Protein backbone atom coordinates (compact mmCIF):
# COMPACT_ATOMS: atom_id res chain seq x y z
CA UNK A 1 0.00 0.00 0.00
CA UNK A 2 2.78 2.41 1.00
CA UNK A 3 4.78 1.39 -2.07
CA UNK A 4 1.87 2.28 -4.37
CA UNK A 5 1.42 5.59 -2.54
CA UNK A 6 5.15 6.32 -2.90
CA UNK A 7 5.10 5.44 -6.61
CA UNK A 8 2.12 7.75 -7.10
CA UNK A 9 3.90 10.56 -5.26
CA UNK A 10 7.08 10.18 -7.33
CA UNK A 11 5.12 10.12 -10.60
CA UNK A 12 3.01 13.11 -9.57
CA UNK A 13 6.15 15.02 -8.50
CA UNK A 14 7.91 14.39 -11.78
CA UNK A 15 4.78 15.22 -13.78
CA UNK A 16 4.36 18.40 -11.74
CA UNK A 17 7.95 19.41 -12.46
CA UNK A 18 7.35 18.82 -16.17
CA UNK A 19 4.13 20.82 -16.15
CA UNK A 20 5.80 23.67 -14.31
CA UNK A 21 8.62 23.73 -16.89
CA UNK A 22 6.03 23.85 -19.66
CA UNK A 23 4.23 26.61 -17.77
CA UNK A 24 7.45 28.61 -17.65
CA UNK A 25 7.85 28.30 -21.40
CA UNK A 26 4.22 29.28 -21.90
CA UNK A 27 4.73 32.24 -19.53
CA UNK A 28 7.75 33.34 -21.52
CA UNK A 29 5.76 33.31 -24.76
CA UNK A 30 2.85 35.13 -23.08
CA UNK A 31 5.16 37.82 -21.66
CA UNK A 32 6.92 38.27 -24.97
CA UNK A 33 3.55 38.73 -26.71
CA UNK A 34 2.55 41.24 -24.04
CA UNK A 35 5.77 43.22 -24.49
CA UNK A 36 5.31 43.21 -28.25
CA UNK A 37 1.78 44.53 -27.91
CA UNK A 38 2.99 47.24 -25.47
CA UNK A 39 5.78 48.37 -27.79
CA UNK A 40 3.46 48.26 -30.81
CA UNK A 41 0.98 50.42 -28.91
CA UNK A 42 3.76 52.86 -28.04
CA UNK A 43 4.68 53.04 -31.73
CA UNK A 44 1.06 53.62 -32.75
CA UNK A 45 0.52 56.32 -30.15
CA UNK A 46 3.69 58.07 -31.34
CA UNK A 47 2.89 57.77 -35.03
CA UNK A 48 -0.84 58.51 -35.02
CA UNK A 49 -1.60 60.22 -31.72
CA UNK A 50 1.65 62.16 -31.41
CA UNK A 51 1.29 61.61 -27.70
CA UNK A 52 4.19 62.36 -25.41
CA UNK A 53 5.76 59.46 -23.51
CA UNK A 54 4.07 60.30 -20.18
CA UNK A 55 0.70 60.41 -21.96
CA UNK A 56 1.47 57.05 -23.57
CA UNK A 57 2.22 55.64 -20.12
CA UNK A 58 -1.21 56.78 -18.96
CA UNK A 59 -2.85 55.12 -21.98
CA UNK A 60 -0.93 51.90 -21.33
CA UNK A 61 -1.90 52.02 -17.66
CA UNK A 62 -5.50 51.92 -18.76
CA UNK A 63 -5.30 49.22 -21.38
CA UNK A 64 -2.52 46.73 -20.79
CA UNK A 65 -2.60 43.64 -18.58
CA UNK A 66 -2.64 44.04 -14.78
CA UNK A 67 0.99 42.88 -14.51
CA UNK A 68 2.19 45.98 -16.38
CA UNK A 69 -0.62 48.39 -15.50
CA UNK A 70 0.88 49.50 -12.19
CA UNK A 71 4.29 50.03 -13.72
CA UNK A 72 3.02 52.50 -16.34
CA UNK A 73 0.72 54.22 -13.88
CA UNK A 74 3.68 54.78 -11.55
CA UNK A 75 5.82 56.17 -14.36
CA UNK A 76 3.05 58.59 -15.32
CA UNK A 77 2.43 59.63 -11.72
CA UNK A 78 6.10 60.21 -11.02
CA UNK A 79 6.56 62.35 -14.13
CA UNK A 80 3.42 64.32 -13.28
CA UNK A 81 4.62 64.92 -9.73
CA UNK A 82 6.78 67.49 -11.44
CA UNK A 83 9.96 66.93 -9.49
CA UNK A 84 11.91 67.10 -12.72
CA UNK A 85 13.58 63.70 -12.42
CA UNK A 86 14.73 62.49 -15.84
CA UNK A 87 12.12 60.36 -17.58
CA UNK A 88 14.63 57.70 -18.58
CA UNK A 89 15.59 57.14 -14.93
CA UNK A 90 11.96 56.85 -13.83
CA UNK A 91 11.20 54.47 -16.70
CA UNK A 92 14.24 52.29 -16.00
CA UNK A 93 13.50 52.08 -12.27
CA UNK A 94 9.86 51.10 -12.74
CA UNK A 95 10.35 48.65 -15.60
CA UNK A 96 13.23 47.06 -13.68
CA UNK A 97 10.92 46.48 -10.76
CA UNK A 98 8.05 45.26 -12.93
CA UNK A 99 10.13 42.78 -14.91
CA UNK A 100 11.84 41.31 -11.86
CA UNK A 101 10.98 37.59 -11.75
CA UNK A 102 9.33 37.61 -15.18
CA UNK A 103 10.48 34.54 -17.19
CA UNK A 104 12.35 36.49 -19.88
CA UNK A 105 16.02 36.75 -20.71
CA UNK A 106 17.92 39.92 -19.74
CA UNK A 107 18.23 40.78 -23.41
CA UNK A 108 14.46 40.65 -23.84
CA UNK A 109 13.84 42.69 -20.68
CA UNK A 110 16.33 45.30 -21.85
CA UNK A 111 14.24 45.98 -24.94
CA UNK A 112 11.50 47.47 -22.78
CA UNK A 113 13.84 49.01 -20.22
CA UNK A 114 15.83 50.85 -22.82
CA UNK A 115 13.02 52.40 -24.84
CA UNK A 116 13.86 55.93 -23.57
CA UNK A 117 17.30 55.56 -25.12
CA UNK A 118 15.70 55.22 -28.52
CA UNK A 119 13.79 58.48 -28.02
CA UNK A 120 15.08 61.83 -29.21
CA UNK A 121 14.08 61.78 -32.88
CA UNK A 122 12.63 65.10 -33.97
CA UNK A 123 9.98 63.58 -36.20
CA UNK A 124 7.19 61.23 -35.18
CA UNK A 125 7.52 58.88 -38.17
CA UNK A 126 11.22 58.31 -37.54
CA UNK A 127 10.58 57.96 -33.84
CA UNK A 128 7.87 55.38 -34.47
CA UNK A 129 10.18 53.46 -36.80
CA UNK A 130 12.89 53.47 -34.18
CA UNK A 131 10.46 51.98 -31.62
CA UNK A 132 9.19 49.52 -34.21
CA UNK A 133 12.68 48.11 -34.61
CA UNK A 134 12.62 47.20 -30.93
CA UNK A 135 9.30 45.43 -31.41
CA UNK A 136 10.83 43.57 -34.38
CA UNK A 137 13.59 42.26 -32.14
CA UNK A 138 11.05 40.88 -29.70
CA UNK A 139 8.96 39.39 -32.50
CA UNK A 140 11.97 37.31 -33.54
CA UNK A 141 12.51 36.18 -29.96
CA UNK A 142 8.83 35.39 -29.61
CA UNK A 143 8.76 33.30 -32.79
CA UNK A 144 11.69 31.26 -31.51
CA UNK A 145 10.07 30.89 -28.11
CA UNK A 146 6.81 29.70 -29.69
CA UNK A 147 8.63 27.10 -31.77
CA UNK A 148 10.62 25.99 -28.74
CA UNK A 149 7.43 25.77 -26.71
CA UNK A 150 5.73 23.58 -29.35
CA UNK A 151 8.73 21.25 -29.58
CA UNK A 152 9.76 21.24 -25.96
CA UNK A 153 6.41 20.79 -24.28
CA UNK A 154 5.87 17.22 -25.51
CA UNK A 155 9.49 16.29 -24.83
CA UNK A 156 9.42 17.79 -21.32
CA UNK A 157 6.18 16.00 -20.49
CA UNK A 158 7.50 12.67 -21.79
CA UNK A 159 10.86 13.08 -20.03
CA UNK A 160 9.18 13.97 -16.74
CA UNK A 161 6.94 10.89 -16.86
CA UNK A 162 9.84 8.64 -17.91
CA UNK A 163 12.03 10.11 -15.13
CA UNK A 164 9.27 9.32 -12.66
CA UNK A 165 9.07 5.72 -13.90
CA UNK A 166 12.88 5.41 -13.85
CA UNK A 167 13.15 6.65 -10.26
CA UNK A 168 10.32 4.31 -9.24
CA UNK A 169 12.10 1.31 -10.79
CA UNK A 170 15.35 2.30 -9.10
CA UNK A 171 13.68 2.61 -5.71
CA UNK A 172 11.79 -0.68 -6.07
CA UNK B 1 0.95 78.41 -8.60
CA UNK B 2 2.83 80.52 -11.13
CA UNK B 3 6.01 80.01 -9.09
CA UNK B 4 5.58 76.24 -9.29
CA UNK B 5 4.92 76.40 -13.02
CA UNK B 6 8.16 78.30 -13.54
CA UNK B 7 10.23 75.92 -11.43
CA UNK B 8 8.70 72.97 -13.24
CA UNK B 9 10.04 74.26 -16.53
CA UNK B 10 13.51 73.23 -15.43
CA UNK B 11 14.98 69.77 -14.94
CA UNK B 12 15.74 68.66 -11.40
CA UNK B 13 19.41 69.58 -11.40
CA UNK B 14 18.76 73.22 -12.35
CA UNK B 15 15.89 73.87 -9.98
CA UNK B 16 17.82 74.99 -6.93
CA UNK B 17 19.16 77.98 -8.86
CA UNK B 18 15.84 78.95 -10.42
CA UNK B 19 13.78 78.75 -7.24
CA UNK B 20 15.00 82.16 -6.13
CA UNK B 21 14.12 83.69 -9.50
CA UNK B 22 10.70 82.06 -9.46
CA UNK B 23 9.90 83.84 -6.19
CA UNK B 24 9.31 86.90 -8.35
CA UNK B 25 6.97 84.97 -10.63
CA UNK B 26 4.16 87.52 -10.56
CA UNK B 27 6.19 90.17 -12.31
CA UNK B 28 8.21 87.79 -14.44
CA UNK B 29 7.53 88.31 -18.13
CA UNK B 30 10.35 86.57 -19.89
CA UNK B 31 13.33 84.27 -19.33
CA UNK B 32 16.01 84.33 -21.99
CA UNK B 33 18.75 81.75 -22.17
CA UNK B 34 21.62 81.87 -24.63
CA UNK B 35 24.47 79.42 -24.85
CA UNK B 36 27.70 80.62 -23.21
CA UNK B 37 25.92 83.70 -21.90
CA UNK B 38 24.22 84.35 -18.58
CA UNK B 39 20.44 83.95 -18.46
CA UNK B 40 18.38 87.12 -18.34
CA UNK B 41 14.88 87.74 -17.07
CA UNK B 42 12.43 90.52 -17.74
CA UNK B 43 10.60 91.58 -14.61
CA UNK B 44 8.24 94.51 -14.84
CA UNK B 45 9.89 95.58 -18.12
CA UNK B 46 13.35 95.68 -16.48
CA UNK B 47 16.06 93.30 -17.61
CA UNK B 48 18.09 91.48 -14.96
CA UNK B 49 20.88 88.94 -15.22
CA UNK B 50 20.62 85.68 -13.30
CA UNK B 51 23.67 84.51 -11.37
CA UNK B 52 24.40 80.85 -10.72
CA UNK B 53 22.47 80.90 -7.42
CA UNK B 54 19.40 82.42 -9.02
CA UNK B 55 20.12 85.92 -7.72
CA UNK B 56 19.19 88.85 -9.93
CA UNK B 57 21.85 91.36 -10.94
CA UNK B 58 22.02 94.51 -13.03
CA UNK B 59 25.38 93.58 -14.57
CA UNK B 60 26.31 90.28 -16.29
CA UNK B 61 27.60 87.89 -13.61
CA UNK B 62 30.77 85.83 -13.99
CA UNK B 63 30.68 82.01 -14.10
CA UNK B 64 26.93 81.88 -14.67
CA UNK B 65 26.90 81.06 -18.36
CA UNK B 66 24.23 78.74 -19.68
CA UNK B 67 25.78 75.67 -21.30
CA UNK B 68 24.64 73.79 -24.40
CA UNK B 69 23.96 70.77 -22.15
CA UNK B 70 21.70 72.88 -19.94
CA UNK B 71 19.72 74.07 -22.96
CA UNK B 72 19.37 70.54 -24.30
CA UNK B 73 18.23 69.24 -20.92
CA UNK B 74 15.70 72.07 -20.58
CA UNK B 75 14.33 71.50 -24.07
CA UNK B 76 14.07 67.75 -23.50
CA UNK B 77 12.31 68.39 -20.23
CA UNK B 78 9.93 70.93 -21.76
CA UNK B 79 9.11 68.48 -24.53
CA UNK B 80 8.37 65.85 -21.88
CA UNK B 81 11.14 63.67 -23.32
CA UNK B 82 9.13 63.40 -26.52
CA UNK B 83 10.69 65.83 -28.97
CA UNK B 84 8.84 64.14 -31.86
CA UNK B 85 5.52 65.31 -30.38
CA UNK B 86 6.62 68.94 -30.78
CA UNK B 87 8.13 68.62 -34.25
CA UNK B 88 5.68 71.03 -35.88
CA UNK B 89 6.10 73.60 -33.15
CA UNK B 90 9.90 73.36 -33.24
CA UNK B 91 9.76 73.80 -37.00
CA UNK B 92 7.81 77.02 -36.47
CA UNK B 93 10.31 78.15 -33.88
CA UNK B 94 8.31 77.96 -30.69
CA UNK B 95 6.49 75.57 -28.48
CA UNK B 96 3.74 76.09 -25.97
CA UNK B 97 4.08 74.30 -22.68
CA UNK B 98 1.79 73.43 -19.80
CA UNK B 99 0.28 76.62 -18.43
CA UNK B 100 0.19 78.29 -21.85
CA UNK B 101 3.73 79.66 -21.61
CA UNK B 102 5.44 80.07 -24.97
CA UNK B 103 9.03 79.02 -25.53
CA UNK B 104 10.74 80.63 -28.52
CA UNK B 105 13.60 78.63 -30.03
CA UNK B 106 16.53 79.52 -32.18
CA UNK B 107 19.51 77.61 -33.45
CA UNK B 108 20.57 76.16 -36.77
CA UNK B 109 17.91 75.65 -39.40
CA UNK B 110 17.70 72.53 -41.57
CA UNK B 111 16.15 73.40 -44.91
CA UNK B 112 14.26 71.21 -47.33
CA UNK B 113 13.17 71.82 -50.90
CA UNK B 114 12.07 75.33 -51.83
CA UNK B 115 13.95 76.71 -48.85
CA UNK B 116 11.28 75.60 -46.44
CA UNK B 117 12.30 75.03 -42.86
CA UNK B 118 12.39 71.30 -42.14
CA UNK B 119 13.66 71.50 -38.61
CA UNK B 120 15.89 73.22 -36.11
CA UNK B 121 19.03 71.65 -34.75
CA UNK B 122 21.58 72.90 -32.23
CA UNK B 123 18.91 74.85 -30.40
CA UNK B 124 21.03 77.30 -28.46
CA UNK B 125 18.67 80.14 -27.67
CA UNK B 126 15.48 79.95 -25.65
CA UNK B 127 13.02 82.69 -24.85
CA UNK B 128 10.40 81.62 -22.33
CA UNK B 129 7.47 84.03 -22.30
CA UNK B 130 5.42 83.64 -19.17
CA UNK B 131 1.67 83.65 -19.77
CA UNK B 132 -0.33 85.72 -17.33
CA UNK B 133 -4.01 85.16 -16.79
CA UNK B 134 -5.48 88.41 -15.51
CA UNK B 135 -9.15 88.05 -14.80
CA UNK B 136 -11.16 91.21 -15.21
CA UNK B 137 -8.70 92.95 -17.52
CA UNK B 138 -11.37 93.26 -20.21
CA UNK B 139 -14.17 94.43 -17.90
CA UNK B 140 -13.68 98.09 -18.76
CA UNK B 141 -14.04 97.37 -22.49
CA UNK B 142 -17.36 95.56 -22.27
CA UNK B 143 -19.74 98.58 -22.33
CA UNK B 144 -18.33 99.58 -25.70
CA UNK B 145 -18.16 96.10 -27.21
CA UNK B 146 -21.89 95.38 -26.94
CA UNK B 147 -24.72 97.10 -28.77
CA UNK B 148 -27.73 98.04 -26.67
CA UNK B 149 -29.52 94.74 -27.42
CA UNK B 150 -26.90 92.48 -25.83
CA UNK B 151 -25.21 91.50 -29.12
CA UNK B 152 -21.43 91.55 -29.24
CA UNK B 153 -19.76 93.68 -31.89
CA UNK B 154 -17.22 91.94 -34.13
CA UNK B 155 -14.05 93.02 -32.39
CA UNK B 156 -10.40 93.20 -33.41
CA UNK B 157 -7.73 93.67 -30.74
CA UNK B 158 -4.66 95.43 -32.12
CA UNK B 159 -1.39 95.55 -30.26
CA UNK B 160 2.37 95.30 -30.66
CA UNK B 161 4.00 92.14 -29.23
CA UNK B 162 4.09 91.99 -25.45
CA UNK B 163 1.24 94.40 -24.80
CA UNK B 164 -1.24 91.83 -23.58
CA UNK B 165 -3.34 90.98 -26.66
CA UNK B 166 -3.69 87.36 -25.75
CA UNK B 167 -4.36 88.15 -22.08
CA UNK B 168 -7.07 90.59 -23.15
CA UNK B 169 -8.55 88.11 -25.65
CA UNK B 170 -8.63 85.34 -23.05
CA UNK B 171 -10.46 87.50 -20.56
CA UNK B 172 -12.84 88.81 -23.19
CA UNK B 173 -13.68 85.25 -24.22
CA UNK B 174 -14.34 84.40 -20.57
CA UNK B 175 -16.60 87.43 -20.13
CA UNK B 176 -18.57 86.73 -23.31
CA UNK B 177 -18.91 83.04 -22.50
CA UNK B 178 -19.92 83.46 -18.87
CA UNK B 179 -22.15 86.43 -19.61
CA UNK B 180 -21.88 89.90 -18.13
CA UNK B 181 -23.89 93.00 -17.38
CA UNK B 182 -24.10 93.92 -21.08
CA UNK B 183 -24.92 90.58 -22.68
CA UNK B 184 -26.02 87.09 -21.73
CA UNK B 185 -23.52 84.22 -21.90
CA UNK B 186 -23.22 82.60 -25.33
CA UNK B 187 -21.42 79.62 -26.84
CA UNK B 188 -17.91 80.65 -27.78
CA UNK B 189 -15.48 78.60 -29.84
CA UNK B 190 -11.76 79.30 -29.70
CA UNK B 191 -9.22 78.22 -32.30
CA UNK B 192 -6.12 78.09 -30.14
CA UNK B 193 -3.40 77.48 -32.69
CA UNK B 194 -0.54 78.03 -30.27
CA UNK B 195 -2.28 76.87 -27.08
CA UNK B 196 -1.79 80.32 -25.63
CA UNK B 197 -5.38 81.35 -25.04
CA UNK B 198 -6.69 78.38 -23.11
CA UNK B 199 -3.29 76.91 -22.20
CA UNK B 200 -4.71 73.46 -22.92
CA UNK B 201 -3.04 70.41 -21.52
CA UNK B 202 -4.11 67.06 -22.91
CA UNK B 203 -6.99 68.84 -24.61
CA UNK B 204 -8.44 70.50 -21.51
CA UNK B 205 -8.24 74.27 -20.98
CA UNK B 206 -6.21 75.23 -17.94
CA UNK B 207 -6.98 78.91 -18.09
CA UNK B 208 -10.48 80.11 -17.34
CA UNK B 209 -12.00 80.74 -20.74
CA UNK B 210 -15.60 80.58 -19.59
CA UNK B 211 -18.27 77.98 -19.03
CA UNK B 212 -19.65 78.01 -22.57
CA UNK B 213 -16.34 77.87 -24.40
CA UNK B 214 -15.14 75.08 -26.68
CA UNK B 215 -11.46 75.03 -27.53
CA UNK B 216 -9.83 73.54 -30.61
CA UNK B 217 -6.23 73.25 -29.55
CA UNK B 218 -3.17 73.28 -31.80
CA UNK B 219 -5.13 73.62 -35.04
CA UNK B 220 -4.26 76.10 -37.80
CA UNK B 221 -6.75 78.96 -37.75
CA UNK B 222 -8.18 78.47 -41.20
CA UNK B 223 -9.01 74.79 -40.78
CA UNK B 224 -9.95 75.31 -37.15
CA UNK B 225 -12.52 78.00 -37.82
CA UNK B 226 -14.31 75.90 -40.41
CA UNK B 227 -14.21 72.79 -38.22
CA UNK B 228 -15.68 74.63 -35.27
CA UNK B 229 -18.44 76.27 -37.29
CA UNK B 230 -19.49 72.89 -38.65
CA UNK B 231 -19.05 70.95 -35.43
CA UNK B 232 -19.83 73.26 -32.53
CA UNK B 233 -22.20 75.88 -34.00
CA UNK B 234 -20.69 78.74 -31.99
CA UNK B 235 -22.36 82.11 -31.56
CA UNK B 236 -18.97 83.74 -31.11
CA UNK B 237 -15.70 82.65 -32.68
CA UNK B 238 -12.38 83.78 -31.24
CA UNK B 239 -8.91 83.54 -32.82
CA UNK B 240 -5.51 84.92 -31.93
CA UNK B 241 -3.03 86.63 -34.24
CA UNK B 242 -4.51 86.95 -37.71
CA UNK B 243 -1.58 86.68 -40.03
CA UNK B 244 -2.57 86.43 -43.69
CA UNK B 245 -5.23 86.30 -46.36
CA UNK B 246 -6.05 82.66 -45.55
CA UNK B 247 -7.05 83.64 -42.03
CA UNK B 248 -9.15 86.51 -43.36
CA UNK B 249 -10.90 84.27 -45.87
CA UNK B 250 -11.86 81.84 -43.10
CA UNK B 251 -12.96 84.74 -40.94
CA UNK B 252 -15.23 85.97 -43.71
CA UNK B 253 -16.77 82.53 -44.03
CA UNK B 254 -17.38 82.45 -40.27
CA UNK B 255 -18.99 85.87 -40.53
CA UNK B 256 -21.13 84.59 -43.39
CA UNK B 257 -22.32 81.77 -41.14
CA UNK B 258 -23.64 84.28 -38.65
CA UNK B 259 -20.88 84.04 -36.02
CA UNK B 260 -19.77 87.07 -34.09
CA UNK B 261 -16.00 87.44 -34.18
CA UNK B 262 -13.25 88.33 -31.75
CA UNK B 263 -9.72 88.35 -33.14
CA UNK B 264 -6.30 89.83 -32.47
CA UNK B 265 -3.62 91.12 -34.78
CA UNK B 266 -0.09 92.48 -34.42
CA UNK B 267 0.12 96.22 -34.98
CA UNK B 268 0.89 99.49 -33.33
CA UNK B 269 -2.18 101.40 -34.46
CA UNK B 270 -5.31 101.22 -36.57
CA UNK B 271 -3.47 103.05 -39.36
CA UNK B 272 -0.81 100.37 -39.44
CA UNK B 273 -3.48 97.69 -39.83
CA UNK B 274 -5.18 99.54 -42.66
CA UNK B 275 -1.91 99.40 -44.58
CA UNK B 276 -1.61 95.64 -44.34
CA UNK B 277 -2.64 94.27 -47.73
CA UNK B 278 -4.79 91.48 -46.45
CA UNK B 279 -6.62 93.76 -44.00
CA UNK B 280 -7.54 96.55 -46.40
CA UNK B 281 -10.72 94.94 -47.72
CA UNK B 282 -11.77 93.77 -44.29
CA UNK B 283 -11.65 97.30 -42.97
CA UNK B 284 -13.33 98.74 -46.06
CA UNK B 285 -16.17 96.21 -45.75
CA UNK B 286 -16.48 96.97 -42.04
CA UNK B 287 -16.22 93.33 -41.07
CA UNK B 288 -15.14 94.52 -37.64
CA UNK B 289 -17.33 96.95 -35.79
CA UNK B 290 -14.89 97.63 -32.97
CA UNK B 291 -11.10 98.06 -32.99
CA UNK B 292 -9.38 98.00 -29.62
CA UNK B 293 -5.81 99.32 -29.75
CA UNK B 294 -3.52 98.30 -26.89
CA UNK B 295 -0.23 99.97 -26.12
CA UNK B 296 2.53 100.07 -23.53
CA UNK B 297 3.12 103.31 -21.67
CA UNK B 298 5.87 103.63 -19.07
CA UNK B 299 6.09 99.88 -18.79
CA UNK B 300 2.35 99.33 -18.37
CA UNK B 301 -0.04 97.84 -20.87
CA UNK B 302 -3.17 99.86 -21.44
CA UNK B 303 -5.98 100.52 -23.90
CA UNK B 304 -5.00 103.38 -26.19
CA UNK B 305 -8.36 103.66 -27.86
CA UNK B 306 -11.51 101.94 -29.01
CA UNK B 307 -12.70 102.71 -32.54
CA UNK B 308 -15.82 101.83 -34.48
CA UNK B 309 -15.95 100.35 -38.00
CA UNK B 310 -15.39 103.80 -39.50
CA UNK B 311 -12.25 104.31 -37.44
CA UNK B 312 -13.85 106.86 -35.12
CA UNK B 313 -13.32 106.93 -31.38
CA UNK B 314 -16.18 105.48 -29.38
Image (cartoon, rainbow, N blue to C red):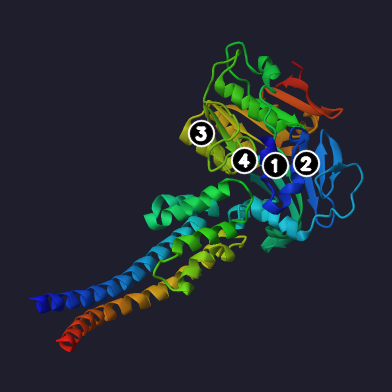
Q: CA distance from mark 1 to mark 3?
A: 36 Å
Relative placement, left or right, of B191 versus B313 is left
The answer to the question of whether label 2 and label 1 lie on touching residues, with beta carbons closer than 8 A, is yes
Label whose residue precedes the other's in the sequence (4 or 1): 1
Mark found first going from the N terminus, 3 or 2:
2
Who is closer to the viewer here, A168 or B123?
A168
Q: Quadrant of residue B195?
A: top right
Q: Secondary structure at mark 1?
A: helix
Residue named by callout 4? B195
Left-right relation of B308 to B63: left
Pick the front one: B250 or A13 = A13
Do labels 2 and 4 touch, CB within 8 Å? no
| Residue B12, above or below A98 | above
In three-dimensional space, the C-alpha distance between marks 3 and 2, rounded to whole angstroms, equals 43 Å
Is the Cβ of the residue at disc 4 closer than 8 Å to that at disc 1?
no
Q: Chain of mark 4?
A: B
What is the distance, in whole Å, between disc 4 and disc 1 at their CAs? 17 Å
Question: Residue visible at 52% across and 53% down?
Answer: A75
Q: Secondary structure at mark 2?
A: helix
Q: CA distance from mark 2 to mark 1?
A: 9 Å
Q: Residues within 10 Å of mark 1 (few under 14, many from 20)?
A: many
Left or right position of A160 against A83: left
Identity of the residue drawn at 51% across and 36% down: B228
Image height of B183 relative to B200, above or below: above
Q: Which residue is mark 1?
A: B6
Amino acid sequence: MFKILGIMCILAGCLGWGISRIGEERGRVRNLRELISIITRIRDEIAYGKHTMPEICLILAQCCSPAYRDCFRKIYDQVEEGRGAPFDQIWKRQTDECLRGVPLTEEEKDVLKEIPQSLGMQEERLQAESVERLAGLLVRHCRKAEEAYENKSKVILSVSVLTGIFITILLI
Amino acid sequence: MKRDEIIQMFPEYLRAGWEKTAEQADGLQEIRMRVNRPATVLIGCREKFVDKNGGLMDMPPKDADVTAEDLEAILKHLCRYSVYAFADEIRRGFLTIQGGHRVGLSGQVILEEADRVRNLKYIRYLNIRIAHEIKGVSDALLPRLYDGTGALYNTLLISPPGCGKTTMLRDLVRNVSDGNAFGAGVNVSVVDERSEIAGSYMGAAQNDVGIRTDVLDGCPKREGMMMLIRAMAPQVLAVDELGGSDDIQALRMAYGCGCRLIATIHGGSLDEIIHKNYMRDVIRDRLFERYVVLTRKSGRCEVEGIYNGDGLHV
